[in-house]
Image (cartoon, rainbow, N blue to C red):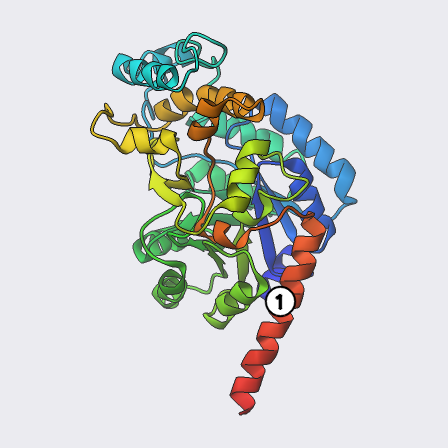
Amino acid sequence: MKTPICDMLGIELPLLAFSHCRDVVAAVTNAGGFGVLGASMHTPEQLEHELAWIDDHVGGRPYGADILVPEKFAGKGQGLDAAAIHAMIGQQQRDFVAALLEEHGIPADGPGGPSRLPTAVTISDQAGEQLLDVAFRHPIKLIASALGTPPAFMIERARQAGVPIAALVGAREHAIKQVNAGVDILVAAGTEAGGHCGEVTTMVLVPEVIEAIRPIREVPVLAAGGIVTGRQMAAAIALGAAGAWTGSVWLTTEEAETAPYTKQKMIAATSRDTIRSRSRTGKPSRQLKSDWTAAWESDKSPGTLPMPLQSLLSEPVMRRIDALAEQGNPGAQELATYWVGQGVGLMNKATTVRDVIYEMAQDFAEAAERLAGAVSD
């Protein structure tokens, strides 16, 4: 299971795991893969705490960090403070959320309601630079970015630290732009992926990206989007990818911090129970269908806000919904959702990270044998 990405990152398996949960990151790294901590919602203090914990639990094995610095977002380049950004959140959207909660038997004025928004804004150029300062104080072996070309300061910091920089792409033109900007690794994320994704399927996107960048320079491409089994990893490598970038498959593991009721919904879900929706961040991202996503897609919706305004509105509310859903509140259970890819239809049991990796490795080996047999025949 050795590919060029293994040599570049010093890992045994060409399997990268994106997770907001430090326990998952450490467990994947310790099992021979490469954990990547999603830090887009962290303050610098929180990120310092999380990375220090990972350092203490991986014994020097390699891991990375993913810091979201979108190419476009509300207030970009305007030097706005948190109060000014919060003032941009429309009253129509606040009222819509309050009414949605009331319809589901949840008082709108409780903790995490639309009138009690967070004071911190974690998506801005300044916030990105602060998070990079923290990340590069730790022995990370990869820095990743999504939603556009990484800003120049991010690429320069990575170069200075001798750390490869990865970028997520959802279309061939994005890949060309990223390679010309100087990124070291491309993550070709198909529409099957959980979180932010485009409209092209992984099966089409991976070879399209590889062919598009070939005339420019050689850059390893990781396949992403719905990959939860070893046979899918084998298929990705057969397409020319150097490995797999995964995320959803870790959400139902014992180590994951996924809200308990949402984890149950994922285990019971099929691949058709997800939707690309702007309801969580303001940009299209795949998540579980729920009354929350349905409401924002309905004729009654005032329309979503641009990033980061939609996130500032939705995230406190969703944390409250998660807590109430775990307590058995039926309205909250109908609203509960989280980012997950179409591979959720294959995620039908709760298990450990180590068991997931073992099963993926075994499944990969069996798929490779079938392919070798087909070639020899």
Residue indicated by mark 1: 363
Relative image position of residue 124 (x, y in whole percent): 42, 26
- Nearest the eye: 119 or 92: 92
**168 displayed left or right of 54:** left
Relative image position of residue 72 (x, y in whole percent): 32, 34
Quarter holding the N terminus?
Answer: bottom right
- Nearest the eye: 91 or 291: 291
Dividing the picture into quarters, in which one does residue 38 lie?
top right
Does the rendering let one see residue 136?
yes
Question: Residue visible at 58% across and 22% down?
Answer: 327
Q: Is residue 119 above or below residue 219?
A: above
Q: Residues within 10 Å of mark 1 (few under 14, many from 20)?
A: some
**Amino acid marked by disc 1:** Asp
Q: Is residue 260 above or below residue 158?
A: above
Question: Residue visible at 58% across and 64% down?
Answer: 230
Dividing the picture into quarters, in which one does residue 200 lie?
bottom left
Relative image position of residue 258 (x, y in whole percent): 58, 35
